[in-house]
């Protein structure tokens, strides 16, 4: 996966993270030697073409199974990456798996990807969330690069969801046609946005992303933008899920509301 990091001007020997603190990171820390001292400095590292390797994916089912349709029972994905083993960990549960996100290292990096299935007016969709910047000035400095890396790596993330939850998708193949909505959360307006990546089967192949990049280079508006962000019924109903009062991702409405 792509990697990006920045850190404060504190000697490395005083804040060197333990192995457990390095466990969950899609972006990684590296140190660059200097003549007089060593400090953590902003470093961006891209790993070339985004390729999904099933052998590097560990899947944890926490309180859900493939027999429960996400239109009736909450279903959330929490994806993290280990810099030590280069393996991905995907937790499939009813809420975000916070145990994957512990430690100052992870709070600084904020490179996890979380997603949840939602049903709006009877139609299923997958809502994916990425933290670009905000909460730490070091992330703000790298907002543009973080946005680029997240966009580039998202097909791999979606493939991990599809592969890890393949039994669910085999039992309910119509979910492959569900639209994927990607929320980029940032305190920089340019990167604080929602994008529709099309049906899951296409988004996970990277085809939609390539189309969007081609359109941007040609300065044309992508037809993908014609899809409207789904809205739930105004009152409680049986055709939307989860209910208004229940969401597994607390900040899922921030971008849509322009906050």
Image (cartoon, rainbow, N blue to C red):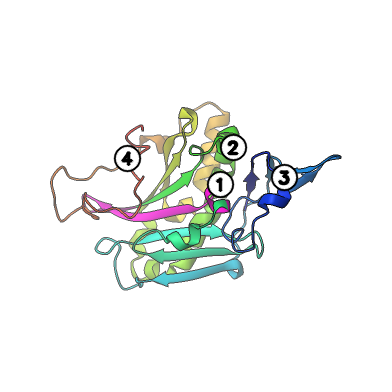
Task: Residue under label 1, please give it.
Answer: 108
**How far apart, in angstroms, are the residues tagged by discs 4 and 1?**
30 Å
Question: Which label lies toward us, 2 or 4?
Answer: 2
Depth check: give the residue in front, 91 or 126: 91
Mark 2 or mark 3, which is nearer the start of the sequence? 3
At x 52%, y 33%, the residue is 215
- Residue 11 numbered tag: 3
**How far apart, in angstroms, are the residues tagged by discs 1 and 3?**
16 Å
Q: Are marks 3 and 4 in contact (CB under 8 Å)?
A: no
Q: Secondary structure at mark 1?
A: helix
Q: Are marks 2 and 1 in contact (CB under 8 Å)?
A: yes
Pinpoint residue 234: horizontal percent, then vertical percent. Answer: 15, 42
Mark 1 or mark 2, which is nearer the start of the sequence? 1
At x 41%, y 46%, the residue is 198
Binning the other alpha carbons within 10 Å of mark 4 as few (below 14), some (14 to 19) or many (20 upward) gives: few
Task: Residue under label 4, please give it.
Answer: 229
Q: Secondary structure at mark 3?
A: loop
Q: Is residue 67 above or below residue 72?
A: below
Question: Which label lies toward us, 1 or 3?
Answer: 3
Q: Which residues are magenta?
A: 105-125
Mark 4 or mark 3, which is nearer the start of the sequence? 3
Which residue in the rendered view is the most extreme toward the front? Answer: 14
- Residue 138 numbered tag: 2
Q: Is residue 239 magenta?
A: no
Pinpoint residue 81: horizontal percent, then vertical percent. Answer: 58, 59
Q: Secondary structure at mark 2?
A: helix
């Amino acid at each position: 996966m792509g990697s990006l990091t920045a850190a404060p001007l504190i000697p490395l020997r005083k804040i060197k993270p333990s192995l457990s603190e390095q466990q969950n990171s899609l972006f990684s820390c590296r140190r660059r030697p200097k003549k007089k001292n060593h400090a953590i400095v902003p470093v961006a590292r891209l790993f070339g073409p985004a390729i999904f390797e099933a052998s590097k994916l560990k899947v944890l089912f926490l309180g859900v199974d493939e027999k429960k349709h996400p239109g009736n029972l909450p279903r959330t994905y929490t994806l993290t990456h280990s810099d030590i083993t280069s393996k991905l960990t995907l937790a499939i549960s009813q809420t975000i798996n916070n145990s994957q996100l512990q430690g100052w290292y992870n709070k600084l990096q904020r490179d996890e990807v979380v997603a949840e299935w939602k049903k709006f007016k009877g139609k299923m969709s997958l809502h994916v969330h990425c933290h670009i910047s905000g909460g730490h000035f070091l992330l703000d400095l790298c907002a543009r690069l973080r946005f680029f890396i997240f966009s580039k790596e998202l097909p791999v993330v979606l493939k991990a969801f599809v592969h890890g939850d393949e039994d669910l998708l085999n039992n309910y193949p119509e979910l492959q046609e569900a639209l994927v909505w990607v929320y980029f959360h940032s305190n920089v307006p340019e990167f604080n946005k929602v994008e529709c990546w099309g049906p899951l089967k296409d988004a996970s192949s990277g085809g939609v992303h390539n189309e969007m990049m081609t359109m941007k280079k040609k300065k044309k508006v992508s037809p993908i933008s014609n899809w409207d962000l789904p809205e739930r019924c105004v009152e409680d109903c049986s055709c939307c899920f989860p209910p208004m009062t229940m969401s597994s991702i607390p900040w899922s409405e921030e971008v849509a509301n322009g906050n």
